[in-house]
Image: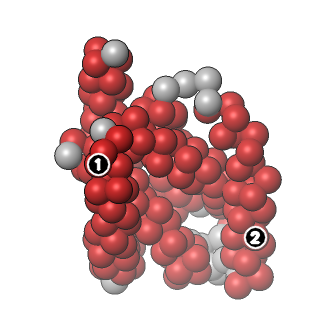
């Protein structure tokens, strides 16, 4: 039950970062021209993001096998915090927005890659063998709840003033502390149960 809270946070992060194209288009003024990112620039940024997710899947998963599943998820949480921080920088600094946005999407790609296999593996670690189906069903419900919360929350943020929308990302940076606390507690429980 404790893991559900952390997993819901992760699924909200995955849902919330899908509002980035609209955020980059509607809220970021690039350079001294005060124009937003063009559609082609945003397309290239997200193509880069997708290519990284594909290319880094196996290498990053193999690297994270060196750690416990809860610690691998902690790495993912830290990457989400860094990525959201870079999105905040993109919206709040008036120079190098393309570089900041590229760095942010690079880190968010790594965060996504680190999350997926580690989350499923941690559910396997936590579930008694006779209840794995139920545990994975609850894990799937976390995705539904994350989508239910994340998408409307992102839409709400895009409808606010630029001040609120630009600082919205800092709330997610702070929420990572909750996820890390939960994951470290679960790591402690798993270590002490063996």
Under tag 2, what secondary structure?
Answer: helix
Residue at 30 percent across and 45 percent down: it is: 130
Mark 1 surroundings: few (<14), some (14-19) or many (≥20) residues within 10 A? few
Q: Where is residue 47 in the image (x, y as percent from the top left)?
A: 75, 70
Nearer to us in this view, 41 or 132: 132
Nearer to us in this view, 3 or 90: 3
Circles 1 and 2 in contact, beta carbons < 8 Å: no
Mark before the other along the chain sequence, 1 or 2? 2
Choose mark 1 or mark 2, whichever is in front.
1
Decide: is 154 above or below 8.
Answer: below
What quarter of the picture does the C terminus occupy? top left
187 left or right of 19?
A: left
Q: Residue 47 carries which label?
A: 2
Residue situated furthest left in the rendering = 1
Residue at 44 percent across and 68 percent down: it is: 15
Image label count? 2
Q: Position of residue 105 (x, y in %)?
A: 64, 58
85 left or right of 145?
A: right
Distance between the alpha carbons at the discs numbered 1 and 2: 39 Å
- Can residue 108 be seen in the rendering of this structure? yes
Q: Position of residue 84 (x, y in %)?
A: 48, 53
- Can residue 96 be seen in the rendering of this structure? no
Residue at 55 percent across and 25 percent down: it is: 67
192 left or right of 57?
A: left
Residue at 40 percent across and 60 percent down: it is: 11
Disc 1 marks which residue?
131
């Amino acid at each position: 039950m404790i893991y559900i809270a952390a997993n819901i946070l992760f699924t909200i992060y995955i849902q919330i970062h899908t509002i980035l194209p609209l955020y980059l288009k509607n809220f970021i003024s690039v350079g001294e021209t005060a124009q937003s990112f063009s559609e082609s620039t945003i397309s290239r940024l997200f193509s880069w993001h997708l290519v990284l997710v594909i290319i880094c899947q196996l290498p990053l998963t193999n690297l994270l096998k060196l750690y416990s599943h809860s610690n691998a998820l902690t790495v993912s949480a830290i990457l989400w915090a860094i990525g959201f921080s870079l999105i905040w920088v993109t919206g709040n600094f008036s120079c190098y927005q393309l570089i900041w946005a590229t760095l942010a999407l690079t880190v968010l790609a790594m965060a996504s890659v680190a999350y997926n296999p580690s989350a499923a593996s941690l559910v396997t670690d936590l579930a008694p063998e006779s209840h794995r189906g139920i545990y994975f069903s609850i894990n799937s419900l976390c995705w539904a709840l994350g989508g239910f919360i994340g998408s409307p929350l992102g839409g709400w943020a895009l409808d606010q003033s630029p001040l609120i929308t630009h600082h919205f990302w800092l709330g997610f940076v702070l929420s990572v502390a909750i996820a890390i606390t939960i994951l470290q507690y679960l790591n402690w429980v798993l270590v002490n149960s063996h």
